[in-house]
Every structure is written in C-alpha cells, then in structure tokens.
Image (spheres, rainbow, N blue to C red):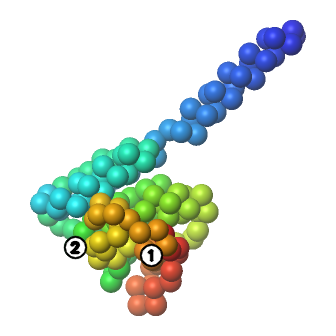
Amino acid sequence: MRRSNLFKICYAALALSATVAQAAVPVTLYKSPTCGCCDAYVRYLQANGFQVTAENRNDMDQIKQTNHVGRLGSCHTALIAGYVVEGHVPVTAIQKLLRQKPNVVGISVPGMPANSPGMGAMKPGMLPVYTLTRDQAAQPAVFSVE
C-alpha cells in the first residue's frame, strides 16, 4: 500500500472516531411544566453537548421515589446513561460520573442553590454534589465539589 493512501485511511479513521466521541449524550429530563429554572438547566445541558428531551410532568414526587432520590431532591430529575442526575448538577460532575462509572444510583445537587447551573452565576469550588444510593437512610456522601 502506498504511503499516501495509508495516511488518508488513518486520517479518515481519526476523523470518524472524533465525530463518534463528540456525539451528544442523550438525556431525559423530567420537570414541572411551570418551572423556569428547569428550562434554564435544559439550555445549559444543551449548550454543553447533551441531547435533552424534557418531559413536563405533574407527578414529580413519584418520579423521584422511583429513582431513589429521597431527601436529596430538587426541582427536576434527569436520566443519563443509566444514572439519575437530580437537580442543578454541573456538567463537570456529570462528565466525571460518566467517565468513572461508579456503582451508584446517581448524583444530586439538592434544593435549588443560587450558585448552580440554571440558577445564576456559578461559583467554582463552592457547590457540593452528593451521591445517590439505594439506601436513602444513609448519610449522603459527597461525590465532588464543583
């Protein structure tokens, strides 16, 4: 095989793998139909490369119960690659979750903290992200601080 053809094949393979690596991660986000900060969070995820399907629901308590959110609840619940992402979780924590693939239900930023995505200006290093486990009586463990 000629060297120039080999170069073209390698270049095409690299370009294809980069395109696959950049494919948007699908997200299903359940939210109240009247929540404006949830819409802001959807836009935040989309701006960071996630493919979001937002579903307006009137049964958020049931969705949170089904997904083992417990006392770490917030205003919306997202399902990403088999994990639950509860509330205004920064993309950096989601990427860490997807990269490390820990044996957990998911991660949460409980409540609606003012320094979280979709809730105003973020302050790096100030936002605790907690691990969601099936044992909702357990003391919440910090997954990361964003």
Q: Position of residue 48 (x, y in %)?
A: 43, 48
Please indicate whether residue 119 sits to the left or right of residue 25 in the image: left
Q: Do the residues under discs 2 and 1 have CB atoms within 8 angstroms?
A: no
Q: Position of residue 45 (x, y in %)?
A: 37, 51
Q: Where is residue 99, by image quadrant?
A: bottom right
Q: Which residue is mark 2?
A: 61
Which numbered disc, 2 or 1, marks the residue closer to the eye? 1
Q: Which mark is residue 71?
A: none
Residue closer to the observer: 115 or 46: 115
- The count of marks equals 2
Q: Look at 38% across and 45% down and name the residue there.
A: 47
Image quadrant containing the N terminus: top right
Q: Where is residue 37, by image quadrant?
A: bottom left
Secondary structure beneath disc 2?
helix
Secondary structure beneath disc 1?
loop
Q: Which residue is mark 1?
A: 126
Amino acid at pointer 2: Asp
Q: Look at 33% across and 63% down and name the residue there.
A: 121
Q: Look at 49% across and 73% down and name the residue there.
A: 125
Q: Look at 58% across and 40% down and name the residue there.
A: 21
Q: Earlier in the sequence, mark 2 or mark 1?
A: 2
Residue closer to the observer: 28 or 144: 144
**In this orientation, does residue 66 appear?**
no
Amino acid at pointer 1: Met
